[in-house]
């Protein structure tokens, strides 16, 4: 099975699900809250970066 990188949104979804779950041990909850704060801070930055380059624009640049 191949390993794939999770997007920041997917990571955030998983962290929030773990925090809501009653099966999550109390020892992990503080670390999960910290990770959630970090991911919410990074989420807007990642979405801006991804939109900056399109394949079509790169293709047109090579044609000239």
Image (cartoon, rainbow, N blue to C red):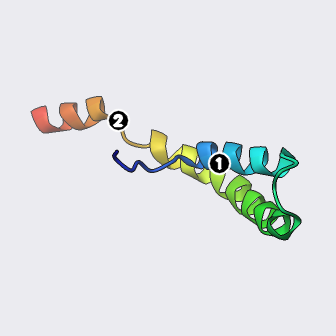
- Which quadrant of the rendered structure holds the C terminus? top left
Say whether residue 64 is visible: no
Would you call the spot at circle 2 few (<14 residues within 10 Å), some (14-19), or many (20 or more)?
A: few
Q: Residue at x 77, y 62 (%)?
A: 32
- Which quadrant of the rendered structure holds the N terminus? top left
Question: Which mark is on residue 35?
Answer: none
Q: Position of residue 38 (x, y in %)?
A: 71, 63
Q: Which residue is mark 1?
A: 44
Q: Residue at x 56, y 44 (%)?
A: 47
Looking at the image, is 9 positioned above or below residue 42?
above
Q: Which residue is mark 2?
A: 54
- Please state if 62 lies on the left or on the right of 4 as rendered: left
Q: Residue at x 13, y 38 (%)?
A: 62
Would you call the spot at circle 1 few (<14 residues within 10 Å), some (14-19), or many (20 or more)?
A: few
Say whether residue 14 is visible: yes
Q: Position of residue 39 (x, y in %)?
A: 68, 56
Most foreground residue, 39 or 25 = 25
Looking at the image, is 12 positioned above or below residue 64?
below
Most foreground residue, 47 or 10 = 10
Q: Position of residue 16 (x, y in %)?
A: 77, 47
| Secondary structure type for disc 2 | loop
Please tell me which of labels 2 and 1 falls first in the chain.
1
């Amino acid at each position: 099975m191949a390993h794939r990188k999770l997007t920041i949104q997917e990571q955030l979804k998983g962290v929030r699900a773990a925090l809501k779950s009653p099966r999550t041990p109390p020892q992990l909850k503080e670390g999960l809250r910290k990770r959630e704060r970090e991911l919410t801070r990074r989420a807007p930055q990642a979405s801006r970066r991804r939109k900056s380059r399109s394949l079509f624009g790169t293709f047109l640049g090579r044609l000239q």
